[in-house]
Image (spheres, rainbow, N blue to C red):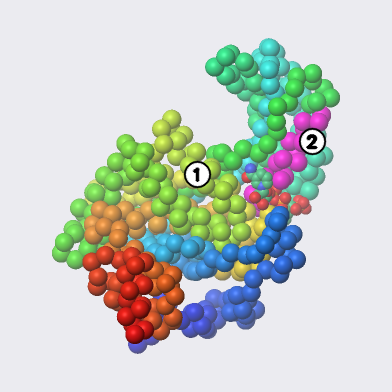
């Protein structure tokens, strides 16, 4: 019988990917060698480099996105993330896969003036400068204009603190094409600010990109047939679907639950972001802020049921991700991750990520409202525990089997079992 992908050894998995023409010979070599970055290279990336941390890179399957089968690269240290993501995607695949859409894709930069005496007067004066500001911006970063991007719009707003002190903020909307855009936007803001400094006596407090990327939204929708949610005779599919809806509604009532609900969504998104060299901190900041857009921190996903009792899922996120610039073009595994996920354009990668988030949330909620999360999680966690106490490749499966039979699983048990095995 042919082994499933997760049952194969690493070498067998790589051979399979090559045989299926999912990777090239060069990619096969790159993955097989697993070489760390050269010291010189790592030194260029960060400051005070003393070593490197390695994370496993895996692949999630079953993602049919807008009718196209996509493989999803994920880098994470957390067991069960990739398994859950593939499982959620499989349930969704059975009902036709994911449908996605996206808004415009622009990043926002802010120039903030402080201690303003007459805010509406300053805003009126700034508005007269709009055309000049556009051309100053274009001169500050001409290459993005050549690529068809650059400043799209400029807005002005007044913000007041509790003491009544006023700020005036210019919000600059920039089309950054396939980049994440932090450096592009910041360079444009620098150029605009130095022009404004010459023209206006008011003091500029700061100029910086905003990570609240609500003009770079992507949405995934899916359907899951209720019957696919059934778990043996214990859990009826329609009941599981109802409970998934109820669990999501509960998250909207309780921040303690909403935070964990959304953390589960980000498990998958962060893993894809890491694998593709994206700025995980920027994505996290934007998504959690977006969860509070209604004035209260809430669930990022929406789950409802249709007339047939099937589950309908939706996830909308700000995903300012990149397929060029930053670390994306320099790390060799990142190039592989982009190729295997067929994400040449940033918007295409963002769509993969939002689907991963929805699949991850479905798998987590289905487990939570039926047999509980620990059953699946702990058997995978057993592998981590066995490896953590120093079990060899031969010893790991023996320890995992023994731990799965035990009432409680922890590091002390793994140590005891290993010692007994080696007696
Ligand atoms: P870069 O500074 O690397 O700029 C993008 C680069 O990609 C440019 O050199 C551009 O070339 C090139 N490029 C090639 N093809 C394209 C294309 N199709 N579309 C757009 N650009 C293209 O990166 P970003 O400006 O994207 O900044 C991202 C980095 O900034 C990340 O590493 C992030 O961590 C970091 N950062 C994040 C901050 C935050 O989140 N608040 C703050 C500061 C930095 P060309 O020059 O010819 O146009």
How many labels were placed on the picture? Answer: 2
- The alpha-carbon separation of the residues under discs 1 and 2 comes to 29 Å
Whether 174 is drawn above or below 232: the answer is: above
* Near-viewer residue (377 or 316): 377
Q: Splitting the image into 4 quarters, where does residue 224 fall? A: bottom left
Percent of width and height locating residue 57: 53, 68
* Near-viewer residue (257 or 355): 257
Q: Splitting the image into 4 quarters, where does residue 145 fall? A: top right
Q: Quadrant of the N terminus?
A: bottom left
Residue found at x 63% / y 41%? 107
User: Residue 167: within the magenta?
Assistant: no
- In magenta, the rendered stretch is 177-195
Sequence-wise, the earlier of marks 1 and 2 is: 2
Q: State whether residue 165 appears in this view.
A: yes
Instruction: Report the disc number at residue 191.
Output: 2
**Mark 2 lies within 8 Å of ligand 1 (Cβ measured):** no
Query: Along the horizontal axis of the image, is 147 left or right of 361?
Result: right
By secondary structure, the bulk of the magenta-drawn segment is best described as helix
Q: Residue furthest right?
A: 198
Residue found at x 73% / y 61%? 43
Query: Along the horizontal axis of the image, is 194 left or right of 256?
Result: right
Percent of width and height locating residue 270: 51, 55
Pointers 1 and 2 in contact (C-beta within 8 Å):
no
Mark 2, other Cα within 10 Å: few <14 / some 14–19 / many ≥20:
some
Q: Residue furthest bottom?
A: 1
Q: Residue furthest left?
A: 233
Percent of width and height locating residue 81: 42, 62
Residue under pointer 1: 287
Query: Along the horizontal axis of the image, is 75 left or right of 242?
Result: right
């Amino acid at each position: 019988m042919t082994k499933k992908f997760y049952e194969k050894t690493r070498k067998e998995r790589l051979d399979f990917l090559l045989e299926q023409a999912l990777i090239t010979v060069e990619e096969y070599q790159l993955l097989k060698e697993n070489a760390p970055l050269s010291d010189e290279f790592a030194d260029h990336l960060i400051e005070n480099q003393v070593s490197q941390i390695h994370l496993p890179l895996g692949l999630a399957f079953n993602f049919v996105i807008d009718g196209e089968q996509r493989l999803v690269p994920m880098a994470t240290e957390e067991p069960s993330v990739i398994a859950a993501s593939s499982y959620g995607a499989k349930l969704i695949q059975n009902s036709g896969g994911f449908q996605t859409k996206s808004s415009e894709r622009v990043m926002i930069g802010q120039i903030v003036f402080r201690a303003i005496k007459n805010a509406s007067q300053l805003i009126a004066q700034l508005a007269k400068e709009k055309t000049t500001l556009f051309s100053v911006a274009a001169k500050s970063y001409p290459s993005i204009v050549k690529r068809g991007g650059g400043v799209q719009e400029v807005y002005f707003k007044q913000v007041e603190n509790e003491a009544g002190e006023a700020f005036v903020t210019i919000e600059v909307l920039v089309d950054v094409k396939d980049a994440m855009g932090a450096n592009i936007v910041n360079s444009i803001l620098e150029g605009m600010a130095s022009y404004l400094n010459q023209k206006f006596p008011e003091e500029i407090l700061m100029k910086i990109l905003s990570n609240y990327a609500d003009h770079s939204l992507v949405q995934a929708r899916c359907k899951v047939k209720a019957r696919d949610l059934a778990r043996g005779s214990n859990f009826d599919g329609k009941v599981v679907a109802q409970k998934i809806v109820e669990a999501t509604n509960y998250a909207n009532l309780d921040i303690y639950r909403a935070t964990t609900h959304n953390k589960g969504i980000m498990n998958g998104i962060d893993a894809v972001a890491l694998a593709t060299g994206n700025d995980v901190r920027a994505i996290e900041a934007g998504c959690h802020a977006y969860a509070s857009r209604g004035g209260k921190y809430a669930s990022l996903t929406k789950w409802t049921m249709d007339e047939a009792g099937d589950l309908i899922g939706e996830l909308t996120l700000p995903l300012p991700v990149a397929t060029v610039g930053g670390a994306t073009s320099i790390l060799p595994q990142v190039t592989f991750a982009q190729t295997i996920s067929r994400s040449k354009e940033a918007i295409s990668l963002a769509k993969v990520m939002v689907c991963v988030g929805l699949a991850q949330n479905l798998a987590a909620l289905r487990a939570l409202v039926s047999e509980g999360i620990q059953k699946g999680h702990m058997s995978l966690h057993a592998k981590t525990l066995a490896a953590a106490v120093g079990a060899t490749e031969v010893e790991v499966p023996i320890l995992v089997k023994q731990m799965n039979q035990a009432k409680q699983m922890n590091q002390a048990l793994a140590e005891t079992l290993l010692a007994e095995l080696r007696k």
